[in-house]
Amino acid sequence: MSDLTSANTTTNKKSVSESGHAKNVANLQSLIAFVTAYGASYNPSKNALKLPQLTALATASQASLGDVVTKNTAFNNKTNERAEAFSNLKPLATRVVNALQITDATAKKVEDAKGFNQKLQGSNKSKKIETLTDPNAEAPKTISTSQQSFDQQIQHWAGLISVVQSETSYAPNETDLKVAALTAKQTDLTAKNNAVATAYTAISNSRIARNTLFYKEETGLLDVVADVKKYIKSIYGATSPQFAQVKGLKFSNKI
């Protein structure tokens, strides 16, 4: 890996925020502007340091940032849609149990329904309840715990439906309490929960691609920039005004 310190590239040893990645691209553009102004005197033998390759790297980096932003927004939108779908599930489950209690259902069947409702009411009880998210907020690095919680709620809801389906006298007049509506609710919850998982996979893969482009050893943006600075230092000298132009450009290093 290129020595970023020897190239006078300032690095941040903490994780890079989304704004930090964008700053890296902005400073790459500044570096390219300086290199362009050097004209024919900037003539490195290493292909990755040549101006056309630097320009291509800047274009690819900007596109990668845009892809992360797009997929991050899509993930947050899907998270919001799921939060909205699940928002009335617990009170609805309680209403279903209450409706079952005024049928001819046996005490055991009502007890089973109450059991599923209690499990559903207790889902994620000790954790922060998901609320609507700013579409521009950064997506989390992992969603496994949250995803499992919603999976469990769907399972408990399906169990409650199975109980009321088995009771022939369960025939409420309220549309949202009918078995068909409860089943449709389950289908909707499952679809929205799966959509979050799919959107998370997309943003996670987009971040991996960005990090590879920016931070992979030897070929990543940071190592290329470090080599460009070294080359400028070698042809103009450590005390040259040309090197002074580029040595202060700061690039954050992803850990």
Image (spheres, rainbow, N blue to C red):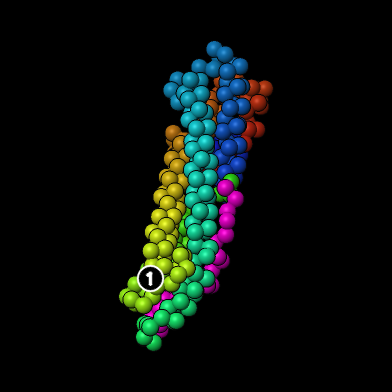
Among the 4 quarters of the image, the one containing residue 48 = top left
**Which residue is identified by label 1?**
161
Residue 252 in view in this figure: no
The relative height of residue 196 versus residue 63 in the rendered view (above or below) is: below
Q: Which of 121 and 10 is in front in this view?
A: 121
Residue, x 44% and y 33% (percent of image)?
219
Q: How many marks?
A: 1
Which residue shows up at 48% across the image and 30% down it? Answer: 60
99 to 5, vertically: above or below:
below
> Horizontal and vertical percent for residue 208?
44, 44
* Viewer-nearest residue: 71 or 209: 71
The part of the chain drawn in magenta is 110-135
SS type, badge 1: helix
**Please, what is the three-letter code of the amino acid marked with disc 1?**
Ile
The residue located at (40%, 60%) in the rendering is: 184
Q: In this view, does 105 lie above or below 198?
A: below
- Of the pair 161 and 168, the residue shown nearer to us: 168
Residue 26 in percent (x, y) is at 60, 32
Q: Residue at x 57, y 44 (%)?
A: 18
- Place residue 9 in its image quadrant: top right
Residue 8, image x, y percentages: 60, 35
Examine the rendered structure and indicate whether residue 115 appears above or below residue 250: below
Q: Residues within 10 Å of mark 1 (few under 14, many from 20)?
A: many
- Does the magenta portion include 30? no
- Residue 36 visible somewhere in the drawing: yes
**Observer-nearest residue: 38 or 175?**
175
Q: Is residue 130 magenta?
A: yes
- Residue 33 in the image: x percent, y percent? 60, 22
